[in-house]
Amino acid sequence: MSAIDQARKTAEGLTYSSGFGNEHSSEAAPGALPHGRNSPQRAPL
């Protein structure tokens, strides 16, 4: 198995959580997050 095949197989098994560069955001209450920011320094609630 070549290094490329090994890397591809490893990458297929990875899962990613929301974080840097992702578009997912969730909030417990409407308006808890400012639009466009997932983790503000000062939350409004």
Image (cartoon, grey):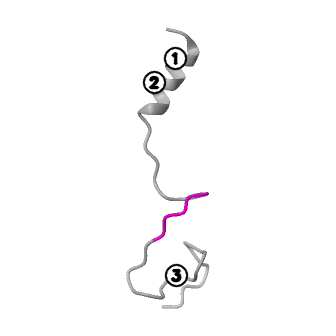
Pick out the residue farthest to the top. 1
Label 2 to label 3: alpha-carbon separation: 37 Å
Determine crowd level at label 1: few under 14, some 14-19, many 20+ residues with C-alpha closer than 10 A. few
Which label is found at residue 9?
A: 2
**Residue 25, how many percent across, how many down?**
48, 69
Q: Nearer the viewer, residue 1 or 43?
A: 1
Identify the residue at image location x=47%, y=27%: 10
Identify the residue shown where x is 44% and y is 32%. Answer: 12
Left or right of residue 45, residue 21 in this image: right
* Badge 2 density bin: few <14, some 14–19, many ≥20, Cα 10 Å: few
Amino acid type of the residue tagged 1 in the rendering: Asp
**Magenta segment boundaries in residue numbering:** 20-25
Dividing the picture into quarters, in which one does residue 36 lie?
bottom right
Give x and y (percent) for residue 37.
59, 74
Is residue 19 toward the left or the right of residue 29 in the image?
Answer: right
For residue 42, above or below residue 17: below
Q: Earlier in the sequence, mark 2 or mark 3?
A: 2
Direction bottom: furthest residue: 45
Q: In what element is the residue under mark 3?
A: loop
Residue lying at 50% horizontally and 18% vertically, measured from the top left: 6
Label 2 with label 1: CB-CB less than 8 Å: yes
Which numbered tag is attached to residue 23? none
Predominant secondary structure in magenta? loop
For disc 1, the marked residue is: 5
| 42 drawn magenta | no
